Image (cartoon, grey):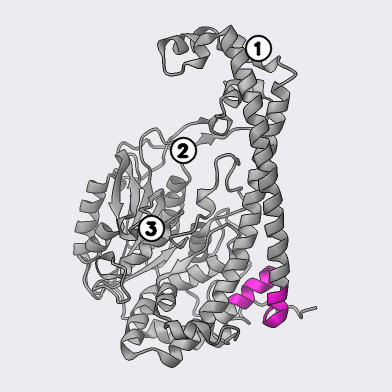
């Protein structure tokens, strides 16, 4: 058995306090902070959303920080309604108590059949987040920053991925408008070159926004002129917790918090539900938490399928020469990322380092991969059963009410107005098929939830392996990087080591 690490949270980190303090001391004194919190949605039909509630929660946190400055919450709805965000999700009750649920099951829409109400609680600073109005707002705001100011832009919402050009990926905004990575990088150049602009972009496909530190968001190794750094929940090619299938409801349970929740909980000192953090995110012991410390806290404590990235980490990965990729592949340097890897191993109840860790990881990864394969095979069999049962029930329904087979027609509207109650009672009475359909669909939903749980567990192993790799990269960089590369890396780390 591996000897457990001391429960004192600082034991892992005291060794690196001097390094972190040096980085912080290298940063100039900053006089004012500004923050822009953007909750992106595509159209007014969007129901009460997690992005909107997350942006409002982050606003409350930033207002309570000692250096709280200018804060603007930009919600999607250009005509916000005062009040709390409320929603009524699909409850686990009998089908007859949920409107239209039998019909939804027969037509494969049961995952979307929920009663939702949308009442966003926004302040007087809110504005509609169309791409053009948002670009104008940011253009003016970035230009108004003083050389000693700092800015923080947080986006939570849908990201439109461009599969061939990451710089063309975009924030999905109101009225189905979009603000691309390339356009956002152009706007960032409006800020003074000495003013740090920190971007925190969550949701799936967020990794495309790592390009914000590159000139014109191009795929090059050098940094652009703006003093920018980026924290993202995902690499560009990974689907995280925010991308889970709607067949599993809910996609994230209340005890599975995404990257943004852990990141800003580190700044608040408490979880989203108000519980004090079990591990201090203050790595250097100076009684304040930088954005990079918040990022590392989210890496260690996160249990969703997110694979977070900081721009300095992406820089190290991009810097590594080809010849170094095949050398030093198994060492475990005693540096910042090596300690993060150990903290992850401790949380996952794995050996802390060496071959025992790799062996245990291999065994658990294989077990979970096998379980995923079996679930996928069962899901495929269920797909066939569900399709056959739905076909049988739809045929019986259409024989009795032909209009039911023709949605989006006047006849269908008349059917809903006059016959839907009788039709649903008819479906529920098909005891040879309808109860079986319900059972198959509920099992399908449970499989989707089980697959997400396994994906989340496998992601924890991926994070651990990546932290070990970053530890080697940091060691290699210290030995082999050019002066120009060191200067660029220092610029990124100084930006990341700022406070909110």
| Relative side of 478 to 444, left or right | left
Callout 3–callout 1 Cβ contact below 8 Å: no
Mark 1: few/some/many CA within 10 Å (<14, 14-19, 20+):
some
112 over 204 or under it: above or below:
above
Q: Nearer the viewer, mark 1 or mark 2?
A: 1
User: In the image shown, does 436 or 144 lie closer to the viewer?
Assistant: 436
Mark closer to the chain start, 2 or 3: 2
Secondary structure predominantly adopted by residues drawn in magenta: helix
Report the number of discs.
Answer: 3
User: In the image shown, does 193 or 463 lie closer to the viewer?
Assistant: 463
Disc 1 from disc 2: Cα separation: 33 Å
Circle 3 residue:
154
Circle 2 residue:
48
Q: Please give the name of the residue rendered at 23% of the width and 47% of the height, measured from the top-left corner.
A: 133
The stretch drawn in magenta includes residue 353? yes
| Relative side of 455 to 225, left or right | right
The image position of residue 356, as x and y in percent, is 73, 79
| Relative side of 340 to 186, left or right | right
Disc 3 from disc 1: Cα separation: 50 Å
- The secondary element bearing badge 1 is classed as helix
| Relative side of 258 to 172, left or right | right
5 over 210 or under it: above or below:
below
Q: Please give the name of the residue rendered at 50% of the width and 50% of the height, measured from the top-left corner.
A: 242
Magenta highlight range: 341-359
Residue at the farthest bottom position: 479
Q: Please give the name of the residue rendered at 71% of the width and 14% of the height, measured from the top-left corner.
A: 429
The image position of residue 209, as x and y in percent, is 36, 61
The image position of residue 392, as x and y in percent, is 64, 19
224 over 163 or under it: above or below:
below
């Amino acid at each position: 058995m591996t000897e457990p690490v001391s429960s004192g949270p600082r034991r892992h980190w005291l060794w690196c306090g001097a390094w972190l303090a040096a980085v912080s001391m290298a940063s100039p004194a900053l006089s004012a902070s500004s923050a822009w919190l953007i909750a992106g949605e595509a159209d007014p039909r969007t129901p009460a959303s997690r992005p909107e509630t997350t942006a409002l929660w982050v606003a409350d946190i930033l207002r309570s920080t000692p250096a709280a400055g200018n804060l603007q919450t930009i919600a999607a709805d250009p005509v916000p309604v005062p009040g709390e965000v409320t929603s009524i999700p699909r409850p686990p009750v009998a089908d007859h108590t949920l409107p239209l649920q039998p019909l939804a099951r027969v037509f494969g829409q049961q995952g979307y059949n929920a009663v939702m109400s949308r009442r966003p609680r926004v302040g007087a600073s809110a504005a509609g987040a169309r791409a053009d109005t948002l670009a104008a707002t940011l253009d003016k705001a970035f230009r108004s920053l003083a050389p000693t100011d700092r800015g923080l832009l947080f986006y939570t919402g849908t990201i439109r991925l461009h599969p061939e050009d990451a710089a063309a990926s975009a924030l999905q905004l109101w009225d189905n408008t979009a603000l691309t990575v390339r356009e956002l990088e152009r706007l960032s150049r409006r800020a003074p070159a000495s003013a740090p602009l920190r971007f925190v972009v969550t949701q799936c496909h967020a990794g495309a926004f790592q390009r914000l530190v590159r000139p014109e968001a191009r795929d090059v190794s050098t940094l652009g002129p703006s003093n920018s750094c980026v924290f993202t929940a995902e690499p560009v090619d990974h689907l995280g917790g925010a991308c889970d299938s709607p067949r599993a409801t809910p996609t994230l349970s209340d005890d599975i918090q995404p990257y943004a929740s852990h990141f800003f909980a580190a700044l608040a000192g408490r979880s989203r539900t108000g519980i004090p953090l079990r591990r201090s995110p203050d790595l250097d012991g100076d009684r304040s938490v930088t954005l990079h410390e918040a990022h590392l806290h989210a890496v260690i404590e996160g249990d969703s399928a997110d694979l977070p990235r900081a721009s300095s980490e992406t820089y190290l990965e991009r810097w590594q020469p080809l010849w170094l990729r095949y050398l030093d592949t198994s060492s475990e340097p005693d540096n910042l990322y090596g300690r993060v890897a150990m903290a992850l191993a401790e949380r996952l109840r794995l050996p802390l380092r060496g071959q025992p860790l790799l062996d245990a990881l291999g065994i658990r990864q294989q077990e979970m991969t096998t379980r995923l394969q079996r679930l996928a095979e069962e899901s495929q069999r269920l797909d066939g059963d569900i399709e056959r049962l739905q076909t049988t029930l739809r045929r019986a329904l259409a024989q009795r009410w032909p209009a039911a087979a023709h949605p989006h027609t006047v006849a269908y509207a008349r059917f809903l107005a006059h016959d839907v109650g009788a039709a649903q009672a008819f479906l529920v009475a098909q005891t040879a098929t309808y109860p079986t359909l319900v059972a198959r669909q509920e099992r399908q939903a449970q499989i989707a939830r089980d697959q997400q749980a396994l994906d989340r567990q496998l992601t924890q192993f991926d994070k651990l392996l990546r932290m070990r790799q970053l530890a080697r990269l940091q060691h290699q960089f210290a030995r082999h990087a050019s002066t120009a590369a060191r200067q660029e890396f220092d610029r990124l780390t100084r930006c990341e080591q700022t406070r909110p």
